[in-house]
Amino acid sequence: MNDPTSAVDPGLVLDLLEAFRRSKTMFAAVELGVFDALEAGPKSLGELAGAIGASTDGLERLVDACVGLRLLDWADGRYANAPAAATYLTKSSPRRLTGYIRYSNDAMWKLWANLEDAVREGTHRWKQTYGWDGPIFSHFFRTEEAKREFLMGMHGFGLISSPHVVAAFDLGRFERLVDLGGATGHLVIAACERYQDLRGVIFDLPDALPLASEIVAASSVADRIEIVGGDFFVDSLPEGDLYSLGRILHDWTEEKCVALLGRIYERLPAGGAVLIAEKLLLDDKSGPRWAQMQSLNMLTCTEGKERTLSEYVGLLRGVGFKDVEGRRTDAPLDAVLARK
């Protein structure tokens, strides 16, 4: 008698079984400095092993795997960075994601090891994994170098998404954009580059401001951007007719989101708006995968989650906003615009 399950392709399960190994291969290569060592040019296995202080046997397996993942090229007995690695995985690249990758390797990897308990209890895993509740910056970013590298990783992420977010709607009628939790200023810079009459404000905690000042000063729109320190839950918000929240609301509970959106609503003039940059789940939550995985990530390490457009509509209308509209992009973040 034939077993009907024998015809089911095991490829999906086998791919997922191996998936974490691919991530860890990239994480390890970044942490060991493989891509930085190849930045000056191709190296043989022996030269590369000497440069990073690794065994030739172990390193050969790692770099050959990176070739298979298309992070490295191999020719004439020498390894070289592929374009993706040169752009996103080297410390000197302005578009690097290495800070976020190292945080994923050092912090989130361990939090995800306790995903089962996060699902059972519905809470983050900081206490279980590290013995404390947070915040992350005081524990993981004790040095200025570590803090800068993490922020630059988030900056690289923002460079991928922010141009798409500010182009999702016509923002040309607004005069002053205030980006709350604006970090390095990638969203404000992208908006000011696209809309020639727009002025911008980066509003974030004081620790983030020195790097923001450096990046803004190097941009072509520095004369139209201000940088202001403060806590958006506590301090008075700078004046503006458009506020933005990029990867902010997914960190927080509904109650805290309502509190923050309510503060924005009260500060806005009539006709003003809030622009939200998050990856939107489909209304039935069947995808996209990026949002589903990020929502699980939020479960392990924050109070928040990813949401559907309908859920954002509920939050926004609950504090008074009207004309809520969402736009999906081809980037890691989508956009929601709500008008007062």
Image (cartoon, rainbow, N blue to C red):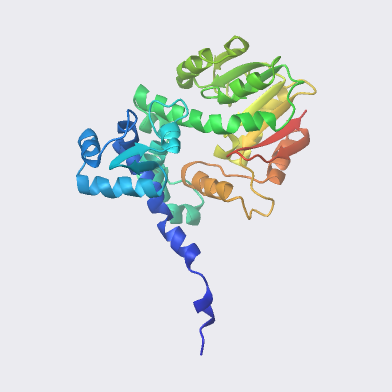
Instruction: Please say whether residue 313 is visible from this viewpoint.
Output: yes
Query: Between 324 and 125, which is closer to the camera in this rendering?
Result: 324
Q: Residue at x 57, y 23 (%)?
A: 234
Above or below, 12 relative to 234:
below
Residue 314 horizontal/vertical position (percent): 72, 42
Residue 316, horizontal then vertical, whole percent = 72, 36
Q: Is residue 261 visible?
A: no
How many marks overall?
0
Name the quadrant containing residue 103.
top left
Give the vertical position of 248 relative to 177 (above or below).
below
In the figure, 45 relative to 96: above or below? below
Residue 31 in picture, x, y percent from top left: 32, 38
Q: Does 94 sit left or right of 44 as displayed?
A: right
Q: Residue furthest front?
A: 76
- 54 and 301: which one is in front? 54
Q: Residue furthest top?
A: 223
Residue 126 percent across, percent down from the top left = 41, 43
Q: Measuring 33% from the left and 41% from the top, which residue is drawn there?
A: 29
Residue under the point 45% across and 59% down: 15
